[in-house]
Amino acid sequence: MSDVQVLLDMGFTRERIDRALAVTNNKGVEPAMEWLLAHADDDLPSEVVTSPPTGAVEITESVPESSQTNEAKPKEEGETAAASNDDAVAKSIKCDECGRQFRSSVEVEYHAVKSGHSSFSESTDEKKPLTEEEKKEQLAQLEEKLKKKRAEREEKEKVEALDREKNRIRSGKDLLEARRKMEEIEMAKIVEARKREKIEEKLAKERVRAQIAADKEARKARMAGDTGASSAPPIEQATPSSSTSVNSVPSKKYSSTKIQIRLPDGSSVVETFDAKEQLSAVRLFIQLKQGIEVPFRLMTNFPRKIFDEEDFEKPLEVLGLVPSSVVIVTK
């Protein structure tokens, strides 16, 4: 809000405001306001004659008494009679509704706009100048208005700043929430893949158990058939049976394997896995426990082998990583 508008809201006329700002070199509202209060009873160099507001009596500014000293005396008798009525000339304008007095029609217009009053009349009473106490009281009221407007403006700025901060915090929370949801989705995918691998592993174990049970039943049936067959000499039967037993001795089966995982930073970690688990279980362990993001490769040194995507679907025992092995992680 400009200085002119602030002073207009306080009740000063535009002409006096312009005069005050010019005298105080446009230094602000307070110097102009002090000048206006100090010169409230002074006449401006030239008052502007304007039309009164709608409904008011049309008033023309009277010429100051000082300017009447040099007027020529009337020559005709009618003019002499009119001169005798100079003592009754209007010295102010009075509001018939509230009783306030004004010096000029500009003040009348401003009062009519602010109060809505429309009944005015000329008055021979001169508007009394403000006393020092009245000036101080009016100055205090104006200062109180200024403080109130300043406080309202500061409060409004605080509310706007608070709203901006709330919007910023809300945007940050929305971003964090979106990031958290993305992480939850990724973790759910990893867990789902792990569950699927466990189900496949369980089915593979069941197939192996079924195959073992079928082999046992076949051996029992074969042994029962051999017992009820021809009775050859014991010595002649012993030799082939012993060789058969030697040849039929299976290699040792391991149910688990211990794998040493060498990480890219030079450190290593040892973990035990089921021999039937797929190589993808080792990769998932590296992702979740060590925090290493894909893509990365797994390889062995002796014998040197780099595992591809097909190898990740094979059990550890098929890949020769049982009963123990060293797996190297490379980028």
Image: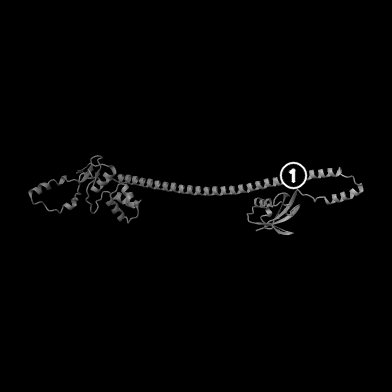
Give how far across and how far down residue 80 sits, in percent. Answer: 10, 48
Q: Is residue 299 above or below residue 107?
A: below
Identify residue type, mark 1: Ala
Give how far across and how far down residue 202 sits, in percent. Answer: 70, 45
Question: Circle 1 sits on which residue?
Answer: 210
Give how far across and how far down residue 45 sits, in percent. Answer: 24, 54
Specify whether 197 is left or right of 128: right
Residue farthest to the top? Answer: 97
The structure's colour scheme is one colour
Give how far across and how far down residue 220 sits, in percent. Answer: 81, 43
Question: How many numbered tags mark residues here?
Answer: 1
Residue 104 shows in the view: no
x 86%, y 51%: residue: 243
x 79%, y 44%: residue: 218
Instruction: Out of 180 and 126, give the one closest to the viewer.
Output: 180
Q: Secondary structure at mark 1?
A: helix
Residue farthest to the front? Answer: 230
Instruction: Out of 13 and 167, give the one closest to the viewer.
Output: 167
10 Å crowding of disc 1: few (<14), some (14-19), many (20+): few
Residue 163 shows in the view: yes
Question: From the image, which quarter does the C terminus lie in?
Answer: bottom right
Specify whether 148 is left or right of 245: left
Instruction: Out of 161 and 203, give the one closest to the viewer.
Output: 203
